Image: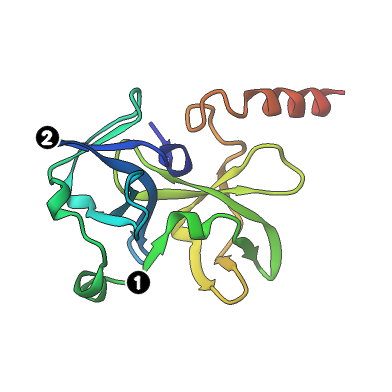
Amino acid sequence: MLRSVRDMLGYDVVSDEGDLGRLADVLFDEKTWNMEYLCISIPTDTSAPRYISAWEIRDFDHEDREISVAIGKKDLKTTLGQERKARGRLRSATSLTRMKVIVDGERIGEVDDLVLGDDSMVVESLAVRSPDSPTPHLHNINRVCDFSDDEGFIYLDRYDPFFFDTPANVWPGERKEEQLEHDRTLNQ
């Protein structure tokens, strides 16, 4: 089943010690789109967020909105220092949302979300919302060919959404009413 990264934000992050915090962001490798780190906020601690390597994830419980990890509070990282240098460029899921998507010099919309594959930790597609559609269209992540951080652009090498509209199972319930209204408008 496809999973919305945006929907996962706010999940409780738990270990054998108990609640560690809430998922605030996810960091991905820019080249492979593998999830590398969970960024968690700790409600009782107003200092910087903490990081957990994705390798420490045991399980995702989407029903209870929980991520189980194999480390405790003492193992949470406050910076990524050497780890970040050892890996490729990391991209934050929240920083990618609202970036403008460009194909052949034309803006086709904005990134609305990142979508993970079947309970994997790899981004499979960008959910791109265009001005003329109430629901985002999914675009294969392999179509991303460049970024312009200064201008807030993501460039795709070609336009080829692989679903006309985003499947309801990615965002259950959230967009059903929007989709019904869109369908009614098309049928008039």
Residue at horizontal 68%, vertical 23%?
177
Which mark, by number, is residue 89?
1
- In the rendered image, residue 77, in percent from the top left (x then y), is placed at 21, 60
- In the rendered image, residue 128, in percent from the top left (x then y), is placed at 60, 49
Q: Residues within 10 Å of mark 2 (few under 14, many from 20)?
A: few
* Total numbered circles: 2
* In the foreground, 183 or 50: 50
SS at badge 1: loop
Give the position of the N terminus as an image quadrant. Answer: top left
SS at badge 2: loop
Q: Is residue 186 left or right of residue 48?
A: right
Q: Can you say whether 88 is above or below 37 in the image?
A: below
* In the foreground, 25 or 146: 25
Which mark, by number, is residue 59?
none
Residue at horizontal 36%, vertical 44%?
43
Task: Measure the C-alpha gap from mark 2 to mark 1.
Answer: 31 Å
What amino acid is at disc 2?
Answer: Asp
- In the rendered image, residue 104, in percent from the top left (x then y), is placed at 66, 68
- In the rendered image, residue 15, in percent from the top left (x then y), is placed at 16, 37
Q: Is residue 60 left or right of residue 100?
A: left
Q: Given this view, does label 2 or label 1 mark the residue nearer the observer? A: 2
Mark 2 or mark 1: which comes first in sequence? 2
Which mark, by number, is residue 16?
2
Q: Can you say whether 60 is above or below 37 in the image?
A: above
